[in-house]
């Protein structure tokens, strides 16, 4: 088994990738998800009514219907994911919701269970150190990380699934570098809801 990870700008996009991996035959016991909750979307999404995990003011289910598949077609799967998520407070990342083997107590206990624990857990399972630093920073800035253990023979197929709508981590770190970022700092203050929204809008504008 090998480990692959991808970063997404919001939970709803990551949830589609998670569901697509499951449809491709990857067990949910081999998939982890870690999502920033600085905007409080988890509490809102757990209540009846609108689900707006990307903070754009539009119901995610409506957005999914608009693109023909996406969130509208997988809202049942997303509801299941929401039910399986747990709230955590991680230094440097702030409030997150997470589920899966990567963020289990046993996995994080090896490296302390803090922000360094996320990076340590990623590198321990074969993720490049620079990528692990970038993934942690991406979660800090409002993103969602999906990590999967897959058979080597399925690597290319699963990477292709995860690459749909994923952040180009090289381009993103270059963008962060222009404002002075070089490595994840677990002592840095977590992003506020307003900062996350501004960060996300910056990426939308660039697209």
Image (cartoon, grey):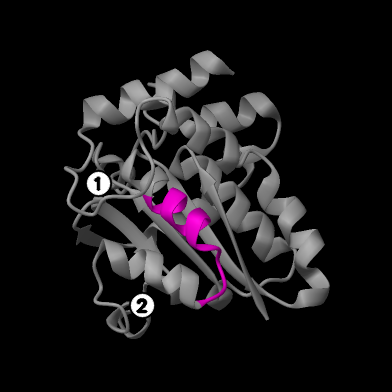
Which residue does the image show at 23% across and 54% down from the upper left?
A: 186
Q: Main secondary structure of the magenta part?
A: helix
| Mark 1 surroundings: few (<14), some (14-19) or many (≥20) residues within 10 A | few
Q: Quadrant of residue 188?
A: top left
Local secondary structure at mark 1: helix
**In this figure, what is the number of numbered marks?**
2
Comes first in the chain, label 2 or label 1: 1
Task: Calculate the distance from the C-alpha at mark 2 to the C-alpha at mark 1.
Answer: 21 Å
Q: Are marks 2 and 1 in contact (CB under 8 Å)?
A: no
What residue is at 34 percent from the left and 31 percent from the top?
180
- Where residue 77 appears, x then y in whole percent? 54, 56
Q: Nearer the viewer, residue 62 or 87?
A: 87
Q: Quadrant of the N terminus?
A: bottom right
Q: State the image coordinates of residue 95 (x, y, percent, origin top left).
A: 22, 51
Above or below, 87 relative to 183 = below
Q: Position of residue 16 (x, y in %)?
A: 59, 48
- Residue 157's place in the image compared with 30, above or below, is above
* Residue, disc 1: 43
Q: Position of residue 199 (x, y in %)?
A: 37, 26
Check residue 59 in the rendering and tell me which mark sits there, or answer none: none
Q: Which residues are magenta?
A: 125-136
Compared with 101, 91 (above or below) is above
| Residue at 24%, 46% in the rendered image | 43
Nearer mark to the viewer, of 2 and 1? 2
Q: From the image, tell me which residue sits under label 2.
A: 104
In the rendered image, which quarter contains the C terminus? top right
Magenta segment includes 11? no
């Amino acid at each position: 088994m090998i480990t692959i990870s991808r970063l997404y700008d919001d939970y709803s996009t990551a949830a589609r990738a998670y569901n697509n991996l499951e449809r491709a035959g990857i067990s949910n016991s081999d998939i982890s998800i870690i999502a920033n909750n600085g905007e409080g979307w988890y509490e809102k999404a757990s209540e009846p009514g609108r689900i707006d995990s990307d903070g754009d003011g539009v119901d995610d289910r409506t957005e999914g219907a608009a693109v023909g598949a996406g969130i509208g077609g997988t809202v049942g799967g997303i509801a299941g994911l929401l039910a399986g998520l747990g709230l955590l407070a991680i230094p440097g990342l702030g409030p997150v919701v997470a589920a899966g083997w990567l963020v289990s107590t046993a996995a994080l206990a090896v490296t302390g269970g803090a922000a360094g624990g996320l990076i340590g857990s990623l590198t321990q399972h074969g993720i490049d150190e620079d990528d692990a630093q970038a993934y942690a920073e991406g979660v800090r800035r409002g993103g969602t990380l999906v990590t999967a253990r897959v058979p080597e023979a399925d690597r290319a197929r699963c990477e292709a699934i995860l690459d749909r709508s994923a952040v180009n981590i090289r381009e993103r770190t270059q963008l962060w570098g222009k404002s002075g970022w070089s490595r994840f700092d677990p002592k840095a203050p977590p992003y506020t809801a307003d900062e996350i929204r501004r960060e996300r809008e910056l990426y939308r504008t660039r697209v």
